Image (spheres, coloured by chain):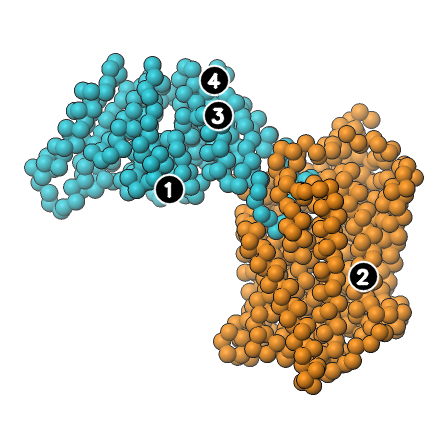
């Protein structure tokens, strides 16, 4: 797979790079580190200054060199300087040109209670990316780049869009050679709900998981579980999360086909999740190649 | 020698490669370039700030001085363009003067540029404050109380600091308005100014003008100015009104279309601005006269900000439009002006003339973040001190500004002459553009600088603010330059590499040496 890291010389950029490297440790992967500079047709009131532009270019190349130095030997890495009106546009253009399978960005700006909030950059990307977007939470860089992806969790639901999500999960689990865990999140939105009600709500979710486990897997280490709680947040918190895993969620049904849009459940998970989140576009179709 | 060559190799490179990579290539057409030019000059702001102080010096000969002020600006801008072509560098005057005259003079040229832009930043914000409260009072039924709030030094300084903070934020994050908004802002500014002129003449025709003064040919006669001192002072002020125009001349790399686009854009810009200045200046004098009472342009109480006083009588119910025009003009100018000191500070940090922190580029917004904030803090501090020290802060800052512009533009002009000394007579074009034009421009600016400096020692100079029995403008000018010298001496101890010429070396290329 081809992993594209949207890099900035900031802590968030280092988070993205660290996650990108861990993903790209998989054999046959390519890591593209992309830095987006302002440019193109953007209107400015401030007169352009070729001298400053050149200094900026030198600086940016220096940043990319620093990023490259952080990537351990043995990983196929390329750095790119992209000129675009915005970070999002630059990443999408680069992703299209390089045929990237996954875009990695640092999601964090100021997370609430130690978890992450979507920065404007990640937010813009989530509204328009045709390929899955991985959000590296604040502090991903602390874990370093050596830890391989320990598990791929796929938060499947009963709603449309799950097929593409499953496919992406399988593909990623195969690529990084990690076990796949399918979870279904169930929120019982009633105070004092008894065990029976929970079971009732969880049943359809369990059947989806059973179906998925039976029909889609071959030769993969797959587990499936249903997580329930008073709210999605509770359900997410109730699950065991491994520090080295990543979690895939589907984008909202409100999104245009093939575009990402963070649904309410995904947004809630994002707030709660202690691990990197990968948002897969609705109707994302990718053949599972061997 | 090898080391020296390496040290300055970056400056000598032609930058053709960059624009091809698409940074700013082809982003500006003829109209866009003219818009940027007018926006940088900010005619509404410039006129309200400079009309009064200039009338105070030259009286009725204001139009003549406006035309004359363009000549040294043009001469220096032509040299500026040559330097920009040979050494495109964000340090502009600092880098060029260092390469021509060495680190000490180069440092002071950079300092002059920073000082001038910081002074203008504080003046811009000050004018914006006045018009902000005027606009509020116009919106809420002409309450004199609200307009008077600008006169309270604490409210005034507080508001000004907020404006500077907002401008810094915008500059730091590199937020840009869309081209459409820019066209509207500039178009609106021009329409309001022309409207002001027309309304002034309507009042004159109706006999309802404040002090109708018939237009006379003598207004265009620079020799009718009473003394050389007044002439020099007026000239240094009117250089300020064209400040920013040089930008259109150096936009050569960014303009699309034919090679003649930048030249045409610069010409068109200056024609538009010149016609506008003359029209508004003539209208203002005809309408209000140069008398010392009421809204007469000779009244010291209104001279720091004339449209503040004139908008009401001339435009009546539409006076609020003038407030909006000046506010938007100031805002646009704040944005484009903020870039200059920040980029020069960045270059000075980059070449080791200042602490390396100044060379930091924000990794998120790609702006010279540290330098931007530093300029903002100094501008805010400068305005605050001036507001409490000076009787007429806007007037004094504009006069000081004129002097600072003369200082660093003069040095830049001479840097052009000296840097190209081995190729003056290589072609006829070179003889004019690298020798005659900048030399004459530099001499004019030097004369203006010295005359202003000497005259401003008189405590009655300009607005009449004084400190220790000396004119405030003189004290200010000297203090700014001396502080520069002190910081330079400190830096030369802490960071000797730059001052030994190790980071930026002297040069005098022969003709064709830097051609690709």
- Residue drawn at 87 percent across, 33 percent down: B510
Chain A image colour:
cyan
Toward which corner of the image does residue B106 lie, by quadrant? top right
User: What whole-number distance in Å separates the C-alpha atoms at marks 4 and 2?
Assistant: 63 Å
Q: Which circle's residue, 1 or 3, is located before the other in the chain?
A: 3
User: What whole-number distance in Å separates the C-alpha atoms at marks 1 and 4?
Assistant: 30 Å
User: What whole-number distance in Å separates the C-alpha atoms at marks 1 and 2?
Assistant: 55 Å
User: What whole-number distance in Å separates the C-alpha atoms at marks 1 and 3?
Assistant: 28 Å
Subunit bearing disc 3: A
Say the numbered circle drawn on residue A117: 1
Disc 1 crowd rating (10 Å Cα; few below 14, some 14-19, many 20+) is many
Q: Please report contact status of discs 1 and 4: CB closer than 8 Å, yes or no.
A: no
Disc 3 crowd rating (10 Å Cα; few below 14, some 14-19, many 20+) is few
User: What whole-number distance in Å separates the C-alpha atoms at marks 3 and 2?
Assistant: 55 Å
Q: List the residue tagged with mark 3.
A: A98
- Residue drawn at 85 percent across, 45 percent down: B433
Q: List the residue tagged with mark 4.
A: A75
Q: Nearer the viewer, mark 4 or mark 2?
A: 2
- Residue drawn at 77 percent across, 45 percent down: B81
User: What whole-number distance in Å separates the C-alpha atoms at marks 4 and 3?
Assistant: 17 Å
Residue B326 in the image, given as x and y percentages of width and height: 62, 65
Subunit bearing disc 4: A
Above or below, B250 against B220 in this view is: above
Q: Nearer the viewer, mark 3 or mark 2?
A: 3
Q: Secondary structure at mark 1?
A: loop
Residue A5 in the image, given as x and y percentages of width and height: 46, 29
Q: Secondary structure at mark 2?
A: helix
Chain B image colour:
orange
Quarter of the N terminus of chain B within the rendering: top right
């Amino acid at each position: 797979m081809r992993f594209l890291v949207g890099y900035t010389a900031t802590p968030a950029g280092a988070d993205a790079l660290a996650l990108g490297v861990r993903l790209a440790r998989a054999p046959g992967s390519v890591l593209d580190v992309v830095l987006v500079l302002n440019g193109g047709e953007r209107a400015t009131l401030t007169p352009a200054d070729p001298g400053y532009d050149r200094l900026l270019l030198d600086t940016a190349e220096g940043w990319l060199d620093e990023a490259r130095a952080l990537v351990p030997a043995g990983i196929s890495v390329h750095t790119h300087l992209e000129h675009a009106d915005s970070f999002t546009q630059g990443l999408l253009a680069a992703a299209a040109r390089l045929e990237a399978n996954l875009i990695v960005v640092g999601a964090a700006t100021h997370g609430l209670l130690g978890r992450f909030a979507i920065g404007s950059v990640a937010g813009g990307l989530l509204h328009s990316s045709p390929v899955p977007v991985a959000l590296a939470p604040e502090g991903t860089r602390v874990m370093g780049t050596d830890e391989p992806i320990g598990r791929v969790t796929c938060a499947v639901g009963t709603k449309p869009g799950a097929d593409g999500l499953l496919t992406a999960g399988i593909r990623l689990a195969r690529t990084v050679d990690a076990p796949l865990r399918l979870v279904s999140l169930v929120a019982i939105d009633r105070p004092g709900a008894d065990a029976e009600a929970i079971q009732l709500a969880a049943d359809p979710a369990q059947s989806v998981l059973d179906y998925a486990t039976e029909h889609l897997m071959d030769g993969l280490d797959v587990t499936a579980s249903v997580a329930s709680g008073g709210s999605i947040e509770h359900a997410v918190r109730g699950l065991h999360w491994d520090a080295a895993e990543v979690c895939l969620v589907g984008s909202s049904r409100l999104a245009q086909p093939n575009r990402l849009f963070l649904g309410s459940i995904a947004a809630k998970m994002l707030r709660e999740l202690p691990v990197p989140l990968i948002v897969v576009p609705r109707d994302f179709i990718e053949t599972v190649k061997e | 020698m090898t080391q020296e060559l390496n040290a300055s190799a970056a400056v000598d490179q032609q930058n053709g490669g960059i624009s091809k990579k698409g940074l700013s290539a082809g982003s500006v057409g003829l109209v866009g370039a003219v818009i940027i030019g007018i926006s940088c000059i900010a005619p509404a702001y410039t006129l309200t700030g400079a009309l009064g102080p200039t009338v105070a010096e030259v009286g009725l000969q204001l139009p003549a001085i406006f035309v004359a002020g363009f000549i040294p600006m043009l001469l220096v801008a032509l040299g500026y363009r040559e330097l920009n072509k040979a050494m495109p560098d964000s340090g502009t005057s600092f880098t060029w003067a260092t390469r021509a005259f060495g680190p000490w003079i180069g440092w002071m040229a950079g300092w002059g540029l920073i000082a001038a832009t910081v002074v203008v930043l504080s003046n811009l914000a000050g004018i914006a404050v006045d018009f902000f409260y005027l606009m509020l009072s116009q919106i809420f039924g002409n309450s004199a109380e609200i307009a008077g709030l600008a006169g309270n030094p604490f409210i005034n300084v507080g508001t000004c600091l907020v404006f500077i903070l907002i401008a810094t934020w915008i500059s730091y994050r590199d937020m840009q308005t869309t081209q459409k908004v820019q066209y509207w802002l500039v178009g609106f500014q021009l329409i309001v100014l022309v409207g002001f002129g027309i309304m002034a003449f309507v009042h004159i025709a109706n006999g309802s003008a404040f002090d109708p003064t018939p237009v006379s040919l003598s207004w265009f006669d620079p020799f009718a100015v009473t003394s050389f001192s007044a002439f020099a002072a007026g000239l240094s002020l009117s250089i300020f009104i064209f400040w920013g125009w040089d930008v259109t001349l150096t936009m050569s790399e960014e303009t699309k279309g034919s090679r003649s686009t930048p030249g045409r854009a610069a010409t068109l810009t200056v024609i538009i601005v010149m016609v506008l200045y003359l029209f508004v200046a003539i209208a203002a004098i005809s309408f209000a006269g140069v008398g010392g009472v009421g809204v007469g342009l000779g009244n010291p109480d209104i001279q720091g900000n004339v449209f503040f006083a004139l908008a009401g009588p001339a435009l009546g119910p539409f006076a609020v439009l003038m407030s909006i025009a000046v506010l938007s003009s100031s805002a646009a100018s704040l944005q484009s002006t903020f870039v200059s000191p920040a980029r020069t500070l960045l270059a000075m940090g980059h070449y080791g003339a200042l602490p390396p922190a100044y060379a930091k580029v924000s990794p998120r917004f790609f702006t010279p973040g540290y330098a931007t904030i530093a300029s903002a803090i100094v501008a805010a501090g400068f305005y605050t001190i001036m507001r409490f020290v000076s009787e007429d802060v806007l007037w004094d800052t504009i006069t000081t500004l004129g002097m600072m512009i003369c200082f660093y533009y003069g040095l830049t002009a001479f840097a052009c002459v000296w840097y190209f000394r081995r190729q003056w007579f290589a072609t006829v074009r070179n003889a004019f553009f690298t020798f005659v034009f900048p030399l004459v421009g530099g001499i004019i600016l030097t004369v203006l600088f010295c005359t202003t400096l000497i005259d401003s020692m008189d405590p009655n100079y300009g607005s009449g603010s004084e400190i220790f029995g000396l004119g405030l403008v003189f004290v200010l000018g000297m203090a700014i330059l001396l502080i520069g010298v002190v910081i330079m001496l400190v830096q030369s101890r802490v960071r000797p590499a730059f001052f030994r010429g190790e980071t930026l070396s002297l040069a005098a290329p022969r003709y064709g040496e830097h051609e690709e």
